[in-house]
Amino acid sequence: MTIHPGGQNICGVSIGVLSLESYFPKPPGHIKNPSSLPFTTTYEILHGLTVQKLLADSSPKLLDPILSAAKRLEDQGVHAITGSCGFLAIFQKEIAAAVSVPVFVSSLIQVPLAYHMTNAPVGVITASAASLTDKHLEGVGAAHLPIVVQGLDDAPEFSAVILRGERTQMDLGKVTDELFAAADDMIERSPDIGAVVLECTDLPPYAHQLQARIKRPVFDIITLASMAHSVAHRHAFPGFI
């Protein structure tokens, strides 16, 4: 007989997500669209913390509600914690220190991995190049690596909806085209880029199309969360000797 300790209201949740408050569409492949994800998820909404607020003010005063949400996720029994915005990287170390489960709040954690896998500069496509600082990169151990940053600051559809919050409706086709244009510009500037990391959690839905276009490995929050899930829940291999 196997005795389990109990104490959880809901069981079987792999990844907990620290979720900024936003109401634009999240197509399949978005960390906040669990219908398409290859792991179970639960969410703690950081009420009042929007993309606009996080990008404008990443001061330590934001930490208390984030840490409280992370601890609630841990209490719910999640096996790892991620975030719904790559700019949470600035708080990666503090959040990881506050809980006892693995924490990976930003896809930027993969920048060192991408660099060591390719021995070439890493392209980082971010929601806002103007907002991505050395402190964000330091938070994930990527500050001294060769990276090429490409922002979507001037992409009309993306910036209007996601960066400025002017409306919740979004033309996904336009966002796709804007991502392609940004990637093309980045590769033209730096053709030696060996791999690309998508900082923004709103971009993974288009990653398969992007990879077909740029012919390079593409990392994002879903590739990272899938890996975290797999290492937290190892299974016996099929097959035979």
Image (cartoon, rainbow, N blue to C red):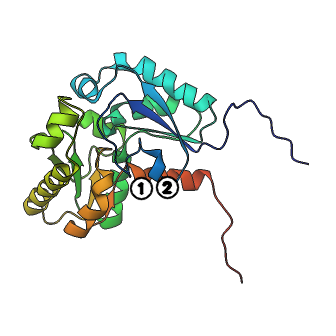
Q: Is residue 129 visible?
A: no
Left or right of 232 in this view: 34 = left
Left or right of 15 in this view: 160 = left
Q: Amino acid at mark 1?
A: Thr
Circle 2: element type: helix
For the residues labelled 1 and 2, the Cα–Cα distance comes to 6 Å
Circle 1: element type: helix
Spot the residue most to the right.
Answer: 1
Residue 130, compared with residue 222, is above or below; it is: above
**Residue under numbered circle 1:** 223
Q: Residue at x 41, y 39 (%)?
A: 105
Q: Position of residue 47 (x, y in %)?
A: 39, 21
Q: Position of residue 181 (x, y in %)?
A: 11, 56
Circles 1 and 2, Cβ within 8 Å, touching? The answer is yes
Q: Position of residue 146 (x, y in %)?
A: 22, 53
Residue 65, compared with residue 12, is above or below; it is: above
**Residue under numbered circle 2:** 227
Q: Residue at x 59, y 31 (%)?
A: 74
Q: Amino acid at mark 2?
A: Met
Left or right of 30 in this view: 190 = left
Q: Residues within 10 Å of mark 2 (few under 14, many from 20)?
A: few
Residue 37, compared with residue 57, is above or below; it is: below
Residue 12 numbered tag:
none
Q: Residue at x 15, y 35 (%)?
A: 160
Q: Residue at x 15, y 55 (%)?
A: 177
